[in-house]
Image: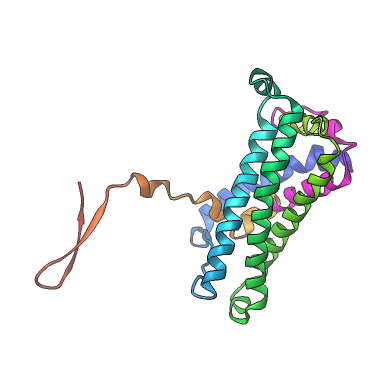
Amino acid sequence: MDYFLFGVLPYLALTVLVVGSIARYERDPFTWKSSSSQLLRRKQLVWGSVLFHVGVLIVFFGHLVGMLTPVEVFHALGMSYGFKQVLAIVVGGVAGAMALAGGAMLLHRRLFDDRIRANSSFADTGILVLLVAQLVLGMGTILASIQHLDGGEMVKFMGWARGIFTLQAGAWELVADVHWIYKLHILLGLTIFLLFPFTRLVHMFSVPVRYVLRPGYQIVRTRKHKTVLEQRP
């Protein structure tokens, strides 16, 4: 079971994530969006969306940097494993609490507003439930991490993540004996990766960078009341 979870499932999930997302974009580009319901219960949507997205982004990039940064970098910076562990607990705890509060607001809005529920697909609601559950598990891992403030468990996950991306066959053995809540957290996270290309989560890849780089446009009305689109220099 540990071999499958830590040695096989990561590659399967990442393959489905990449290949599935590319295939969906090529075959069904018009579904590459996050359907909006902003006209319904807008205030709850705004607060929930801001808390959720900001919290999730901090948590995601915190995991990315924390697990994939070579330990030699932390040695060079003079940062001990214990300090990094405490920093991860504090920053991850605050960001996780924000994301969980926002996710709970969004889920409540989607489940208990009749009009929103009627216009929500099973995938829309289901993926939000999984994300909230993942945040709950993530907050639960803090309790386990507090028992290892020396950073020992964290180093195991850093070695495992690095081993996955460098194709080390025995990387899974580094984390075979970790607490069950970490295993459940990773299992649900990889499951979300597997479902990613088939849900509204694909909109995360649609960062509108090209709108920042494109030249500006100005709407000009002529005396004949015709709207003209002029390109600004």
Residue 2 picture location, percent across and down: 88, 40
Residue 107 among those drawn in magenta: no
Q: Residue furthest top?
A: 76
Q: Quadrant of residue 165?
A: top right
Residue 214 picture location, percent across and down: 32, 47
**Does residue 80 appear in this view?**
yes
Residue 67 picture location, percent across and down: 70, 34
Q: Depth check: 83 or 113 in front? A: 83
**Position of 222 relative to 15 (above/below):** below
Q: Which residues are magenta?
A: 165-192
Q: Left or right: 152 with respect to 40?
A: right
Residue for point 52% across, 53% down:
25
Residue 211 picture location, percent across and down: 37, 50
**Position of 1 relative to 171 (above/below):** below
Residue for point 66% across, 42% down:
91
Q: Left or right: 77 with respect to 228?
A: right
